Amino acid sequence: MILNVVKIFAPWLIAFFAGLAFSPILTHFLYKYKMWKKKPGNNTGLGGGGTPIFNKLHKEKDTGTPRMGGIVIWVSVLFTTFIFWAISQFFPSEFAKKLDFMSRGQTWLPLFTLIGGALVGLFDDFLVVSGKGKYTAGGLSLRLRILIVLWIGLIGASWFYFKLDVSSILIPFVGNWELGLLFIPFFMLVMLFIFSSGVIDGIDGLSGGVLASIFAAYTGIAFFQNQIDLAAFCAVVVGGILAFLWFNIPPARFYMTETGILGLTTCLTVVAFLTGQVVVLPIIAFPLFATVISNIIQVGSKKVRNGKKVFLVAPIHHHFEAIGWPSYKVTMRYWVISIIFAIMGMIIALIG
């Protein structure tokens, strides 16, 4: 038991300190080459039209602050994973092998989706800072990003269905619900929904605090389900996120953007299915779901009610800014809500 606890917290700490050490190097590069938007502005890309209120709120921050801060997260995860694997290979001992959390059944797939999604996001970020892409601000079109996420989801779902023989989901207090072949499209839709919540990366410190709470909850769930390798992996992700957050709290030195968001959201989906606790995901990740739902409500209202809006601006965290909340108040209250709902979801998952 004690060794399992060490196996989780030691990589967590190493990922955090590795991220802290790497961040100044990345920051120097991002500022030296001005890796930020060259033109302010945003477009929903969802049929909701422009976002003039958002543009007004974030005009000064939109340019001048680098993107690609999410690199800190996945580089920290890769570095830590490699270090523990390398030690077990080149300095073999029972202790070293026990601390190595790289395993085919628990960590290969989430690591693959994290890095695969992150690299696609990195390419998108390069397009944004160069001003190339479909929209004024640059970047891959929303349709293409959706197709990429669905493709990643198809690969992940196929691995679960054909390799791991998973075709059902666990409903707390009820039992397993068999989906059969429908498991594959269900998995893909969940991944797409979670990816859609990536717009939460819109205020300094917001996405980092929320995602750290979510992955910490799944660390606990995996640990108590005796998925120790997966728990260690989730802990390493938390360590990387916290290192990023150190430099992202107001005023942010850089933003997470797509290289962090796309990697983390696709990885989160895989983690939720690996633990068998995807049904509690809307609770554990409540701020992410609230973000998506508020966007759906806003766009739907404008379509059905001839342009009338429910919120001053969506997603809802920007609505709070628009009514006068300082951005740091929005961020800190989201952190509190994230922790509360993460604990609630973890409790339901463990006793259900």
Image (tube, rainbow, N blue to C red):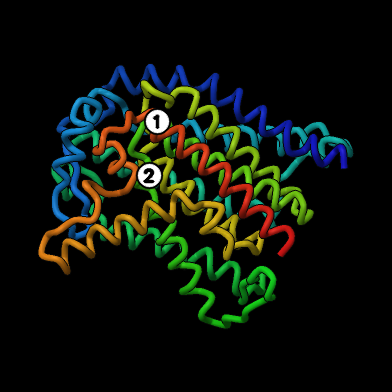
- Cα distance between the residues tagged 1 and 2: 15 Å
Query: Which label belongs to residue 295?
Result: none
Q: Amino acid at mark 1?
A: Lys
Residue 137 as seen in the image, left or right of residue 143: left
Q: Residue at x 45, y 39 (%)?
A: 334
Q: Residue at x 45, y 18 (%)?
A: 25
Residue 106 as seen in the image, left or right of residue 206: right
Q: Is residue 11 above or below residue 345?
A: above
Location of the C terminus (image quadrant): bottom right
Q: Is residue 9 above or below residue 132?
A: above
Residue 346 as seen in the image, left or right of residue 293: right
Q: In the image, residue 85 lies at what x, y percent?
A: 71, 39
Residue receiving disc 1: 329
Q: Nearer the viewer, mark 1 or mark 2?
A: 1
Residue receiving disc 2: 200
Residue 186 as seen in the image, left or right of residue 340: left
Image quarter of residue 326: top left
Q: Is residue 9 visible?
A: yes
Viewer-side residue, 120 vs 250 = 250
Label 1 vs 2, first from the N-terminus: 2
Q: Is residue 262 above or below residue 2?
A: below
Image quarter of residue 322: top left
